[in-house]
Amino acid sequence: MVNRSDTKTRILDAAEKLFAERGFSETSLRLITSKAEVNLASVNYHFGSKKELIRAVLARYLDVFMPAASSEIVSLQSSNKDASLNDIFSTLVKPLLDLNQLRSEGTRTFLQLLGRGYIESHGHLMWFITTHYGDHLTQFVKAVVDSAPHIPPAEMFWRLHFTLGTVVFTMASADALTEIAAADFGEHNDIEAVIRKVIPYISAGVAVPVTA
C-alpha cells in the first residue's frame, strides 16, 4: 500500500512536470491525478486546492534557492563592498545550478515554472512569494539598487521587470536558442552557459544612465 508521503510526492512530481510543460492555467487537476495515478480526493487531502498545489510545487525550489541566493549576496558584499551589477547577478548562478542536485533538470524546471507564473499573471503566486520570501527579495533588490544609485526608484522598478521578462523569455526559449546557436554558429551551450550569457546583458540594461 502506498503511504501518504509517497502519494504526496507523486502528486507534486506530476504537477511540477505538467505545470512546466503546459502552464498552470492549462493543467487541470484531472490531468495531474491521471499522471500521478491518484484520485482527486488525494489532492484535496494533501493540498486542499489547485492554488495550494501550485505553491507547494514552487516551494520545493524556493525553500532551497532563496536562502542560498541570500547567502551568496552576503558573502559577496562582505568581500567586495563595491560589487558591480554583474557581480550581484552572478551570485544567482550557483544557487540556480545547485537546483539540479535537488531535482533532475531542476534549474531549467524552476525557471520554467517562474516564467509560467510571470506570463500567466497569477496574483496569488506573487502574494505567496512576497509573503514567504520577502526578506530575501528585499535583500536582492537592495543590492541591485545600491550598485546603481544613479537610477531613480521608478526607473529601477521598470528595469527590474524588464530584467525578469528577459530571463523568462530566454529560459522559455532555451532549447530552441541552443539548437539555433549550435546549427548556425557551432556553439554548444548548456543551461549554465545560457545563464552566464544573459547576465552581462541584463547588467548593462539595468545600469545604463537615464536619458532626458
Image (cartoon, grey):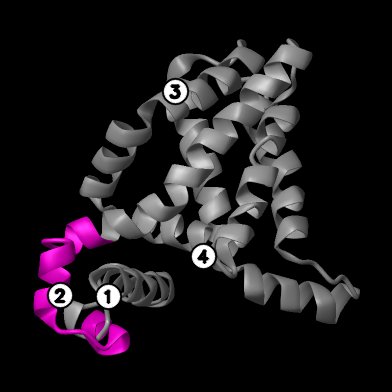
Determine whether the residue tagged by mark 3 lies in a helix, strand or loop: helix
Residue 109's label in the rendered image is 4
Tag 3: amino acid = Thr
Tag 2: amino acid = Ser
Mark 3 or mark 1, earlier in chain:
1
Image location of residue 110, percent across then percent down: 49, 58
Q: Mark 4 and mark 1 in contact (Cβ < 8 Å)? A: no
Image location of residue 166, percent across then percent down: 56, 50
Residue 42's label in the rendered image is 2
Badge 1: residue crowd in 10 Å (few <14, some 14–19, many ≥20): some
Instruction: Give above or below for 186 relative to 117.
Output: below
Mark 3 or mark 2, earlier in chain:
2
Between 109 and 195, the one lying in front of the other is 109
| 4 lies left or right of 170 | left
Q: Residue at x 56, y 63 (%)?
A: 106
Badge 3: residue crowd in 10 Å (few <14, some 14–19, many ≥20): few
Determine whether the residue tagged by mark 2 lies in a helix, strand or loop: helix
Kindly identify which residue carries mark 3: 138
| 162 lies left or right of 46 | right
Q: Residue at x 69, y 71 (%)?
A: 177
User: Is residue 170 among the parts visible in the rendering?
Assistant: no
Kindly identify which residue carries mark 1: 7
